[in-house]
Amino acid sequence: QVQLVESGGGLVQAGGSLRLSCTASGRTFSSYAMGWFRQAPGKEREFGAAINWGDGRTTYADSVKGRFTISRDNAKNTVYLQMNSLKPEDTAVYYCAARVTPVLLIIQSGYNYWGQGTQVTVAS
């Protein structure tokens, strides 16, 4: 059974940085794609970034491109989301997701497993 556990959320001032972690267990993830999504209060969950575990290819939503960086540490089975220049509109619950094939998708339905989420709050 695949388990995804997020950590690293918290409260930060606008312009600050946070790094989220997603530790995966239960499978060999070399052929997986991993994504970060977020859901703000009263809004739909939206795509943020994705990475292929095997070759490291990435894709980003326009809203985070240039500010957020997704990466992975194969030895630790962990995917990271480095978030810089944070804005109040980045406030949301951030979710890690895993897809069993190495295809970078921006739609939620393309992912098979989800973490429980971690809250990020950016104060103005």
Image: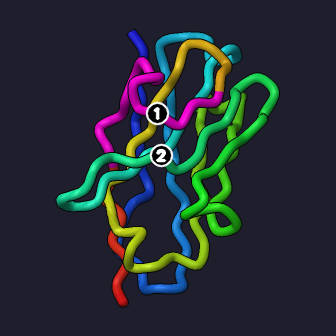
For label 1, the residue is 107
Q: Secondary structure at mark 2?
A: strand
* Residue at left offset 34%, top offset 84%: 123
Q: Quadrant for residue 31, please give it.
A: top right
Magenta stretch, main secondary structure class: loop
**Which segment did they paint magenta?**
104-117
Query: Is 2 rendered above or below residue 62?
Result: above
What's the distance in space between the residues labelled 1 and 2, CA to CA?
7 Å
In the image shown, does 13 or 104 lie closer to the viewer?
A: 104
Q: Position of residue 98 (x, y in %)?
A: 50, 25
Q: Earlier in the sequence, mark 1 or mark 2?
A: 2
In the displayed structure, would residue 118 be above or below residue 90?
Answer: above
Q: Amino acid at mark 1?
A: Ile
Q: How many numbered callouts?
A: 2
Q: Nearer the viewer, residue 24 or 56?
A: 56
Which residue is rendered at x = 55% and y = 74% of the image? Answer: 17
